[in-house]
Image (spheres, grey):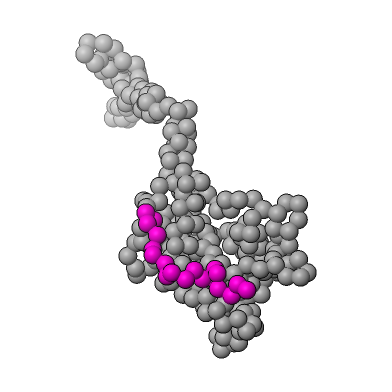
Amino acid sequence: MMKKQYLAAAMVSLMMAMPLSGCAGQTASESAATEESEPETINGEASFGPVEDTEKEEAPVEEAETEEAPQIEEDPAEAPPEEAEQDVQDQIVGLPVYKSPESGSIEEAITLWLWKEMGFETPNHEGGVNIPAYVIVKTETTEDDFTKVYGDFWVYEYSLDGTNFVCESGGSYPGVFYLRQNENGYEASSFEMAEDGSGYMESVEAICGDNEELKKAFLESTDASNPKCINARIGFIRWYANANGLKIDTYQDFGWDPVSLAETVPEPEEAPEEAGEE
């Protein structure tokens, strides 16, 4: 009995010591390794790596081709000149600065003084221009060789809309200029301007003295609706347009109809500039 037990135990030990056989006589571990090492077959061809890894490696090539496409279509070298040319076409060209028709004249001397001393050389509106419209009622020479010029020295600012000169602003500057003559012509020394407000009439009387005719003509020159004032505007604008090669047919104040430059307005028989002559 004891021998049978020992024999059974020895057989069990022998069986445990023997390796377990797998597929085709391989061990379980060898069978698993064989399965992992066997290549997969795709469309009859062996593949030794995962198919997904191969597809991921090719993807960046397709993305690179997509990024290069816009560089081929765009030509950056030609773009800046076209944009610059368009910018030049869109720029608003300002009107030429007003210049007096005659160098060394009374009109130029007055204009230079107003432009410098009162700042009319630079217009308030971009693209605009300041143009005078002087209504001179009397000129006389004093004993100390001053030339006195009486009148209202209007200055208007215009902008050009088609062929219409649109008045943006304007001012009346009545008074008397004191001019000197030198080898270059007239030069303004000073300007005595009439006061505003309650002191206006008193200052006009001081400028004109006892000469009632001069005072009457002086006051008329300050009325913008006076034919002499209108004709002065027409004359100065005509000169400016012709001198600068501009086509200007009318001028227009805010709230009023355009005024044609083709014809001047009839003036009274008595010319204001002759008033007060002795």
| Side (left or right) of 204 relative to 85 | right
Q: In this rendering, does residue 164 appear at all?
A: no
Quadrant in which residue 28 is drawn:
top left
* Secondary structure, magenta segment, majority class: loop
The outermost residue toward the top is 44
Q: Quadrant of the C terminus?
A: bottom right
Which sits in the foreground, 162 or 70?
Answer: 162
Whether 164 is drawn above or below 31: the answer is: below
| Side (left or right) of 66 relative to 198 | left
Q: Where residue 190 appears, x then y in whole percent?
A: 70, 69
Identify the residue shown where x is 76% and y is 66%.
Answer: 145
The outermost residue toward the front is 278
Residue 87 within the segment the image draws in magenta: no
| Side (left or right) of 10 relative to 203 | left
Residue 275 within the segment the image draws in magenta: yes
Q: Give the range drawn in magenta.
A: 261-278
Q: Where residue 269 appears, x then y in whole percent?
A: 43, 69
Which sits in the foreground, 239 or 255?
Answer: 239
Identify the residue shown where x is 61% and y is 51%.
Answer: 102
Quadrant in which residue 83 is drawn:
top left
Q: Where residue 113 appears, x then y in whole percent?
A: 66, 62
Which sits in the foreground, 144 or 53?
Answer: 144
Q: Where residue 276 appears, x then y in whole percent?
A: 59, 75
The outermost residue toward the left is 43
Q: Quadrant of the N terminus?
A: top left
